[in-house]
């Protein structure tokens, strides 16, 4: 069962700080750099009123946490979810700093969003909420300062509203220069072809590369996916195309199982008119949600929310590989159990980094006034992700550490080098 809002919030910031300090100890991080990276640069909270369809006014709270920009502008998603608060945003912003650094991008980390359940609002209300949030953030975002992207419950439409609102605050002659204030926009509004599938493709590719390193292919492999949103859908599609079989899927509404395989396209078509819900799909049977992670398979893909694999259920997992499609789906206690069992975890900052790499390509496309074709984008994505995967794999072998520690060491070392070379102002 996908964890409740309180369970998701609880411990996320503690998790990321514990991971950071564990890595800092392992790599003997410069103590001054440890102090800097252990805090966030800015924590922005905005309260803003919006008129609802009924004529009543509601006041919303929005957040944007900017963790570190030593390597470049802040970059990270905006999510619309009841679990959004300062601590959750701080944790996610720090993960974004590591993710962008590991990928070799000229970005720092940020995260934020609005504490709402978007299912409770009409499309018109969501548009007004988004535009008012953008206006409230003001100069705290910008194409060379902090570049938001889609996250949980936000999409290309959300990004189009943000871009339009932000650009409307500029002089007409400057508007075209500010299109890259967000990434993940619709293709017709400056978006990148392939950005929609970039995160899911990255999850699939890291799974494929891990199996190839063992002399195996994905043909005939079985996998289960938690969360059938953008990431869960696309990774399932790519896995299926490569011969793997989806045997179970879980979302907030249902847990489905079919040992013969679940057709990914059929499930997607079923879920579309139901706001993404998989409930009622006839191509699989419903099962008890608490038994989901116990299903024997080759790959477990948590692609929903944080803190899903914990000490309470990690012992149930019966697969050699976990590929983290979500951010922070495994807490530290759960991870310790998995590593003790000999299970490999491809960490979120590597596994789902295809999204931010795709965002970087979109940012470059807008910045340079270019238009990239889908084939070109996917080729660049494959090359970049493979390069990063091989670096982490090499670190795992050389330092005899788990994959998360190896990825963190590479990410933090790059930022440490930047501070040492540049010095601390003044």
Image: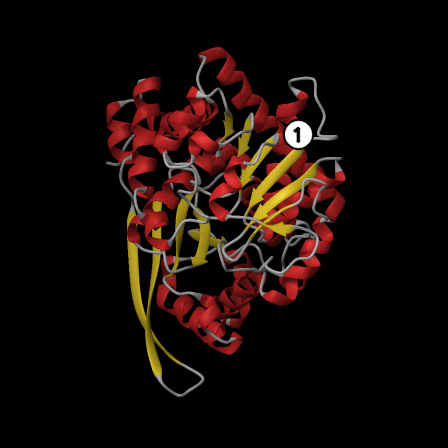
The residue lying toward the viewer, choosing from 37 and 11, is 11
The residue lying toward the viewer, choosing from 348 and 299, is 299
Position of 283 with respect to 405 (left or right) is: right
- Residue at the location (66% across, 57% down)? 281
Residue 358 visible at all: no
Q: Residue 83 placed where, x, y %?
A: 36, 56
Residue 277 visible at all: yes
The residue lying toward the viewer, choosing from 73 and 225, is 225
Using the image, determine if residue 385 lies above or below residue 172.
above
Displayed quadrant of residue 221:
top right
Position of 378 with respect to 93 (left or right) is: right
Displayed quadrant of residue 39:
top left
Q: Is mark 1 on a helix, strand or loop?
A: helix
- Residue at the location (51% across, 13% down)? 397
Position of 349 with respect to 157 (left or right) is: left
Q: Residue 343 placed where, x, y %?
A: 50, 24
Quadrant for the C terminus in the image:
top left
- Residue at the location (32% across, 25% down)? 22
Displayed quadrant of residue 72:
top left
């Amino acid at each position: 069962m996908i964890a409740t809002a309180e369970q998701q919030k609880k411990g996320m910031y503690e998790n990321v700080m514990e991971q950071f300090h564990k890595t800092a100890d392992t790599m003997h991080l410069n103590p001054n750099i440890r102090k800097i990276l252990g805090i966030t640069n800015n924590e922005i909270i905005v309260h803003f009123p919006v008129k609802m369809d009924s004529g009543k006014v509601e006041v919303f709270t929005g957040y944007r946490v900017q963790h570190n920009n030593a390597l470049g502008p802040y970059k990270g998603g905006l999510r619309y979810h009841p679990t959004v608060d300062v601590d959750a945003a701080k944790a996610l912003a720090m993960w974004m700093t590591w993710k962008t650094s590991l990928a070799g991008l000229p970005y720092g980390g940020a995260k934020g969003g609005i504490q709402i359940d978007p299912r409770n609002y009409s499309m018109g209300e969501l548009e007004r909420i988004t535009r008012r949030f953008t206006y409230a953030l003001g100069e705290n975002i910008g194409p060379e300062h902090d570049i938001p992207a889609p996250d949980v419950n936000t999409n290309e439409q959300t990004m189009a509203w943000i871009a339009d609102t932000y650009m409307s605050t500029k002089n007409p002659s400057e508007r075209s220069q500010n299109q890259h204030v967000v990434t993940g926009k619709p293709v017709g509004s400056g978006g990148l072809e392939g950005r929609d599938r970039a995160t899911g493709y990255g999850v699939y590719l890291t799974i494929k590369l891990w199996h190839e390193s063992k002399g195996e292919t994905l043909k005939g492999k079985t996998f289960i996916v938690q969360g059938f949103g953008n990431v869960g859908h696309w990774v399932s599609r790519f896995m299926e195309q490569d011969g793997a079989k989806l045997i179970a899927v879980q979302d907030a509404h249902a847990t489905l199982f079919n040992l013969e395989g679940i057709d990914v396209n059929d499930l997607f078509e079923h879920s579309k008119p139901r706001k993404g819900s998989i409930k009622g799909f006839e191509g699989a049977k419903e099962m008890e949600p608490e038994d989901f992670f116990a299903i024997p398979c080759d790959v477990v893909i948590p692609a929903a929310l944080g803190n899903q694999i914990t000490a309470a259920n990690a012992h149930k997992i019966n697969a050699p590989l976990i590929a983290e499609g979500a951010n922070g789906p495994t807490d530290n206690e759960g991870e310790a159990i998995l590593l003790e069992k000999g299970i490999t975890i491809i960490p979120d900052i590597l596994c789902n980094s295809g999204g931010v790499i795709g965002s970087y390509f979109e940012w470059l496309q807008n910045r340079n006034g270019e238009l990239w074709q889908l084939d070109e984008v996917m080729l660049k994505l494959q090359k970049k992700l493979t390069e990063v995967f091989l670096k982490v794999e090499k670190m795992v072998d050389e330092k005899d550490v788990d994959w998360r520690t190896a990825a963190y060491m590479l990410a933090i070392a790059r930022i440490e080098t930047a501070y040492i070379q540049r010095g601390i102002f003044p």
